[in-house]
Amino acid sequence: MVPSEIDREGDLESPVSRDLCLRAFRWMILARVLDDKLASLYRGGKIHGGVFLGRGQEALSAAAGVSLRRSDVFAPLIRDLAGRLGFGETVLDVVRTYLGSALGPMRGRDGNVHRGRPRQGLLPMISHLGAMISVANGILLARRLKGVTDSVGIASIGDGATSTGSFHEALNQAAVERLPLVLVVANNQYAYSTGNERQFACRALIDRAPGYGVEGCTVDGTSLVECLSAIGQAVARAREGRGPQMIEARLLRLCGHGEHDDAGYVNAELKAGAIGRDCLKLAEEFLRGRNLASPQQIGQWRREAQATVEQAVAQVQREPGPDPYAEEWCALSGRKLADPAQV
Amino acid sequence: MSVTYLEAIREAQARALAEDSRVFIYGQDVGAFGGAFKATKNLAREFPGRVMDAPISEDAIVGLGVGAALEGLRPILEMQFADFSTVGFNQIVNQAATLFWRTGVPCPITIRLPCGGTSGSGPFHSQNLETIYSHYPGLVVMAPATVEDAYSMLLAAIAIDDPVIFCEHKLLYYHLKAESLPAEALPVGKARLAREGRDLTIVAYSAMVHEALAVAAQLATEDVEVEVVDLRTVKPLDTDTVIASVARTGRLLAVGESWPWGGVTAEVVSRVAAEGFNLLDAPPVRLNSRDTPVPFHPSLWKAHRPTAESIANAARKLLRQ
Ligand SMILES: Cc1ncc(C[n+]2csc(CCOP(=O)(O)OP(=O)(O)O)c2C)c(N)n1
Ligand SMILES: [Mg+2]
């Protein structure tokens, strides 16, 4: 018999449903397969600009994506492919943005991880770290002003970005307004090449939560079930009106900062230790060990993911790029207000 | 009954709040206190829940405004002083100004910047930042010179679907008065002929329009007719009206209150030189503040920015050419 609720060692604060766990796991597989494909396209010189992977962070990210409703708000960052897919971003949107297709949401105007569909609650990150949190705050505040009270927003942030002024301003703002914001901090031990010891001096990032007057917890970012439990619970609390929630997940970036970076600076002990384990492998072992999914089933999912990705890449590679002669070259929506400057 | 420039700004916001349920105001001390300059006086009481005090977090104030705009609202964000908008600079130029171009989703926010000096305010409560915001694509930058424009252009700013930087001049807040609020206005992006003349064109905006008008009145006694063009919006810049004026006068003096390197006056001169070179009877001249921070002491402050006196001197020199 397959249990419908998993509580792993019986030590989770909230039980995680089998269905949610399997859904998140499938997004993890798809994200890994797609990331691997993007990396190989990059190595083959098929991608302009950088490629930034979420390898090692799929459990945390997928847990965020599937914990939200489609009507909620998600402000992902660079390592959130799994969460974006779980929230509803299509593989085509991803591939089109990376390959610069004119048919993608960014139409060649922006690339790689800088993509989104703001009308669908998926915020298009700008590069400047920390800047998306207050934008999520604005959506949540606006919804409250409009009388929509059951929305939640998740904003992702890295250990490095917690040092920005905008992170501080936005978290304080969310707390002052008691907004239903869940801030998921992926503490992957590095910001590009800079380790935590040069990034912050507090004992743990989560110690900051009470300083802002927000609830907080830490989670093992390599464990899908723990991530699902912690984020699910934080989302539920935020939805109940308990104000912002902060989660610090501990994990390790299992790739370079971008695909241009060999990450030779990552500490070997961290890689060999518990924090360096691959969340996707752990999730698979867990599901198989608990008889929640068979090896055949998992193999089937992986093949489906590969087929989806290959099909999308083949399709997008035949699509046109943006046409500089047809481009409007106007940054205002009100074209009448365009400046008549001669270029 | 008369109305001041500041009251016009307050009345425009009151009307926007009354007529459009999407409008709200967010900024430091704008709530019950009514704002550092009282531009939101009584609005929190008249429109409960829609005029909100913000923490001292300009970055997050603008970021929140962008999010609310995405959700269909029309935020008016008050910077307590234009100078502090630099703390929110990133959200203004990289978030708000790029949103439409990147995603096709407009960003209708209005950011109010109390600009310009009053003597005694010093380097950090006196700045004019229209130039720096105009440099970035994706922003509309307004600098009204009159009570009527303060009112109608602020209403227009709120109605525009793009981010608007609304530069209101603190020196005009209290002393500039009009009989009543206007019922109609020139379209956004159109400059105004503030005074007609045929000997020299002074292009100005915001408080400098009044200095230019004083010069025109003074030079009229010397038998010189000065034409004054009030740009109203500095971006878009109404090149046509400027060039049409230079075509009549043959002489151009561009006056601005921000710093001399680059800027609105440089843009005016460059456009006239590029598109109307043959209309000029003398090399065009520009006059700006001095290239230092804005000084505190009244005697330094007066000598830092263009005044009727320095503009008149520049005009006389140009007329002799
Ligand atoms: C404000 C700002 N400064 C610098 C950068 C350049 N940058 C991009 S990612 C990055 C490291 C981010 O580290 P972290 O927040 O820990 O996220 P991670 O890459 O580990 O997921 C840096 C320095 C930036 N994007 N934004
Ligand atoms: Mg990091």
Image (cartoon, coloured by chain):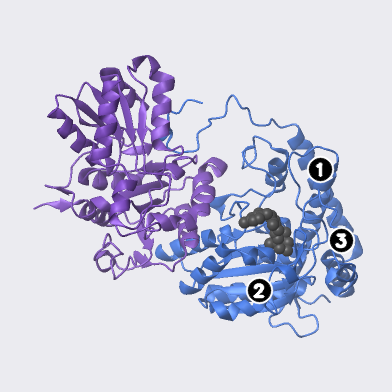
Chain colours: A blue, B purple
Classed neighbour count for the residue bearing mark 1: other residues with Cα under 10 Å, few (<14), some (14–19), many (≥20): some
What type is the residue that disc 3 sits on?
Ile
Give the left or right position of residue A298, taking residue B108 as reference.
right
Asked if the beta carbon under badge 3 is closer than 8 A to the nearest atom of ligand 1, the reply is no
- Residue lying at the far bottom of the rendered structure: A10
Pointer 3 or 1: first along the chain: 1
* Mark found first going from the N terminus, 2 or 1: 1
Residue at x 42%, y 32% (from the top left corner): B267
In the picture of the structure, the residue carrying the numbered disc 3 is A298
Answer with left or right where residue A32 lies relative to residue B106: right
Quarter residue A24 falls in: bottom right
* Residue B139 image point, x, y percent: 45, 42
The relative height of residue A45 versus residue B32 in the rendered view (above or below) is above
- Name the front one of labels 2 and 3: 2
The crowd level at tag 2 (other Cα within 10 Å; few <14, some 14-19, many 20+) is: many
Three-letter code, disc 1: Tyr
- Tag 2's secondary structure? strand
- Distance from disc 2 to disc 1, alpha carbons, whole Å, reads 33 Å
Dot 3: chain letter: A
Q: Residue at x 28, y 38 (%)?
A: B310
The quarter holding residue B188 reads top left
Q: Nearer the viewer, residue A311 or A127?
A: A127
Q: Which mark is residue A247?
A: 2
Residue at image mark 1: A42
Helix, strand or loop under label 1: helix
Judge whether residue B276 can be spotted in this image: yes
Three-letter amino acid code at disc 2? Answer: Ile
Pointer 3 local density, CA inside 10 Å: few below 14, some 14–19, many at least 20: some
Instruction: Write the residue at 91% across / 70% down.
Output: A272
